[in-house]
Each structure stands twice: as C-alpha cells, then as structure tokens.
C-alpha cells in the first residue's frame, strides 16, 4: 500500500511501512475451501456421534417396559422427550454439516 509517517508526539516521526497483502484470490479460495471442509466435517462428525450416543437410551424408553415407565412417571416422559429433541437436533446438525462439506468442495470449482 505504501508508506506513511506518524507523529508520536515527542517531536519525531516514526515511519510505518505497510506491506501489501500478497494473497491471490486463488489462495484465499483454497483457504476458504479447506475451512468450510474442516468446519463441515467437525459439525457432521459431532452430530453423528451425538445421534449414536442418544440412540441407546431412546431404544430403552421405546421398549415395552420403557413405555410403561413413561406412562406412570412424568420424569421418564420428560427425559424421553428431551432425548428425542437431541436426536432431531443431531439430524439437523448432520444435514448442515453435510451442506458445509459440499460448499467446501464446490467453492474452488467456480473458476
């Protein structure tokens, strides 16, 4: 960008030299692509892990004894509903993570 002088208040000036940003558009796109890929992969893996973690208690609550427990104990019903909510959040997170991975893959292909 150039040079400019800045007065530091002590009677002298200090010369600041600004270096131009040497990143080309291709390098920036490559970094963005890798960033979207990494972010999408992390979200996707976290969502899949959470989904798998929640499935075992849900299957317990959906068994015959679990259904009886949910019928007689409101705390079991609340716990079951919370787990179902986590399951849906995990599915939505996996979809969002997959979309971010696709964005990362196709970002650099627009040249």
Image: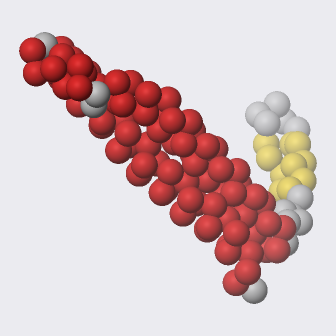
Measured from the top left, where is residue 92 in percent x and y?
A: 41, 51
Pinpoint residue 106: horizontal percent, then vertical percent. Answer: 67, 74
Which quadrant would the C terminus be assigned to in this image?
Answer: bottom right
Chosen colour scheme: secondary structure
| 97 relative position to 3: left or right | left
Q: Is residue 57 above or below residue 100?
A: above
In the displayed orientation, state which residue is furthest to the left: 72
The image shows a total of numbered marks equal to: 0
Question: Residue 5, position in %: x, y?
Answer: 84, 52
Q: Residue at x 23, y 26 (%)?
A: 64
Front position in the image: 22 or 80: 80
To which quarter of the image does residue 3 belong?
bottom right
Can the viewer see residue 45?
yes
Q: Can see residue 1?
A: no
In front of the other: 100 or 22? 100
Q: Is residue 13 above or below residue 64?
A: below
Q: Quadrant of the N terminus?
A: bottom right
- Residue 97 shown left or right of residue 24 in the figure: left
Is 62 or 44 nearer to us in this picture?
A: 62
In the rendered view, does 107 fall on the left or right side of 75?
right
Which residue is farthest bottom? 111
The residue shown at (30%, 36%) is: 84
Residue at 82%, 74% (x, y): give it: 26
Give the image location of residue 36, x and y in percent. 66, 58
Q: What residue is drawn where x is 27% and y is 31%?
A: 62
Residue pushed farthest front?
Answer: 64
């Amino acid at each position: 960008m150039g040079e400019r002088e800045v007065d530091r208040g002590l009677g002298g000036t200090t010369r600041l030299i600004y270096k131009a940003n040497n990143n080309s558009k291709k390098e920036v796109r490559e970094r963005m692509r890798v960033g979207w890929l990494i972010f999408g992969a992390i979200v996707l893996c976290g969502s899949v892990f959470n989904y798998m973690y929640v499935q075992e208690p849900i299957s317990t609550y959906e068994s015959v004894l679990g259904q009886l427990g949910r019928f007689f104990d409101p705390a079991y019903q609340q716990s079951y509903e919370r787990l179902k909510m986590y399951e849906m959040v995990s599915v939505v997170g996996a979809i969002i993570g997959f979309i971010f991975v696709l964005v990362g893959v196709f970002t650099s292909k627009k040249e």
